[in-house]
Image (cartoon, rainbow, N blue to C red):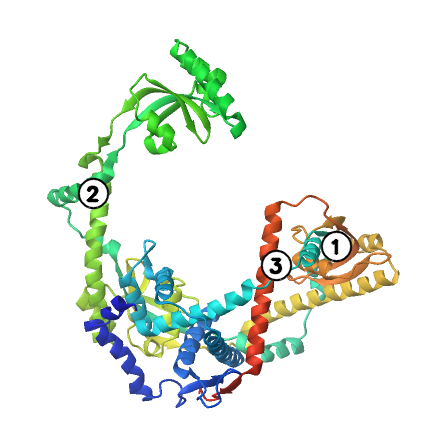
Amino acid sequence: MLQKIHDKITGWIAAIVIGLIGVPFIFWGINVGFGTASYAAKVASSDWPWWKTSPKVSAEEVRRAYQNRMAEYQQQLRKDVPQEMRTELQENLLEAFVRNELLMQHATQLGYRVSDQQVMKAYEEIPQFQVDGKFSQEAAVRLLQAQGISPAAFEADQRRSLQISQLQNGLAVSAFVTPSEMTRARALEREQREASWMRIPAADFLAQSAPDDAAVNAYYEKNKANFMTPDTVALKYLELKVDDIAKDVKVTDEALTTYYESVKDRYVEPERRRGRHILIQVGSDAEDAAARKKAEDILAKVNSGGDFAKLAKEFSQDAGSAAQGGDLGWAERSFFVGPFADALFGMKPGEVRGPVRTQFGYHIIRLDETQSAKQKALEDVRGELEAEYRKQEAEKVFGERQEQLADKAFEHLDDIDAVAKEVSLPVQEIAEFTREGGGPLGRRDEVIAAIFDNNDVLNGQNSQPLELSPGDVVVVHVVSRREPTQKPLADVRAQIVEQLRQEGASSSARRLAAELAEKLRAGATSWSQVATERKLKTEGPKYVNRSEATLPIEVRNALFAALKPDSGPRYQSVPLGNGDAALLAFSGVRQDASAEAAQDQQNRERGMNARVGMREVSGYIKAVRADAKVTKNSKVFE
């Protein structure tokens, strides 16, 4: 199984893989990872034989997954991940591995199996293993090698995933929705509710919102972590671009001629023809005979000397060409559907054919002129070919120089200036680069992660070559670092005051909305009175559905979550996401009586069955987990 991939892990690739595997042993010994734990959890399903040792979840796999997820979080947050988030991630990640192991045990016990062919098919369909839409063995090897994963380990992981999917799919497809449930769901989804609403802007209360020094000081003390200077480094970097190499590629007439000969088939202008047609459309099978008879009558008129263009204007049902006497202009064969193209490109100028049947109907066709296929000369495409040739030759050199850059960056690990001399690249500098990026490198996630998530690079070692885009790589080197420090209150006071003013104004708007909603419910005021006294614009009343875009989403959600009104409108206040508040009056319910398309009904049924299937799977997993015997290693992340 996957023998070709296995065979690739030999020679220099094998040496790298062995080297990658060996690095952890240097630092941690045999027990790879954070501590001495050899397993993350012991997991046994309720049916697991008591005399057998409980299967173990690999500590190394859990730690690797944790490190990868942490790197993602750090890139997103652009700062260290808070401890509470780390703890939550550790718990959720370990629990996910436990549940996966349980599902695997149950899938095996229930007889689910995965063939080698299924594994290979899934393997070849992975987008990252494809080049131009087709599976590439070389791409797969490179990617697995870069991740430090052996083909055998990846194959085993694929097999486990497919086996678990079989179990989950088996549960999901067995779920179904009853007709009464479908009817109820349709009624709810198509229900319309009558609503009026008005917005109470927080901005109206900004003038009244003036935080005192005590509030500012308290906010600062509570949120000090949010007022830190950015983690900043000064960088030197080397950039290797294929476009720069292309500028130095010498293009001789002989080389360009040879290249032209190798690609000249691309520069053949295909044969073109200019014809006319008269189309008689066929609306249904029942109309076919009548349409053909009409086309034959028109053909007889053409053959009797009738003016083709005039007949096309009179009878053709092709709106695009009838007014032009059926003229289709100059076109290649590929422009036309098969039967039409076969006829037109099998005729001689002046010849008329028909009726020719296509999916559009019956055609009477006349060929007016032809243009033979023509080969473009080298001089006609010299500019395009020269640029293409330069790029192609540059890409060959680029691969060699990229490998040289990687070797020299590692050889002179602490000295990027020495690397620059060896690879003949200018040293470029960025005075301030943060987790938000900076300088000519901009905000590049791969560069930011390579710097701030790698202690070796932060401590002054060269990075490995980082691909900014195809044909553009950089090696970065941290010259100095300015770690985050606490900003003094004086520097952030204005920011805090504005934040507190906004929060105070929002609280005032929402408090007023709640008070007015209470008065409306008590009958102490009316909807129109509130609008008049507060000078608020009211919307509605109008019936809206669950996808109504004119209502703020918070108002719409509150409207369709509310209980149906009894004798009068239901009033409530609704906080809005932008800090404003809203008053909502819910006054009626009706059903959408319009007909529903069969496709919409089918889509709803599929969606409901999928949701029920997901609930079945979720319930099964919870039940399996509740009955299992699980021992977690509390030290796995230490």
- Which quadrant of the figure has residue 492? bottom right
x, y percent for residue 627:
57, 82
| Residue that mark 2 sits on | 263
Q: Nearer the viewer, mark 3 or mark 2?
A: 3
- Which quadrant of the figure has residue 353? top left
Mark 2 neighbour density, 10 Å: few (under 14) some (14–19) many (20 or more): few
Q: Nearer the viewer, mark 1 or mark 3?
A: 3
Q: Amino acid at mark 3?
A: Met
Per the model, the C-alpha gap separating discs 1 and 3 is 35 Å
**Residue at x 54% of width, y 27% of height:** 286
Mark 3 neighbour density, 10 Å: few (under 14) some (14–19) many (20 or more): some
Q: Earlier in the sequence, mark 1 or mark 3?
A: 1
Left or right of 16: which side holds 500?
A: right
Location of residue 90 with respect to 509 vertically, above or below: below
- In front of the other: 176 or 590: 176
Residue 426: assigned label = none
Location of residue 339 with respect to 199 vertically, above or below: above
Residue 608: assigned label = 3
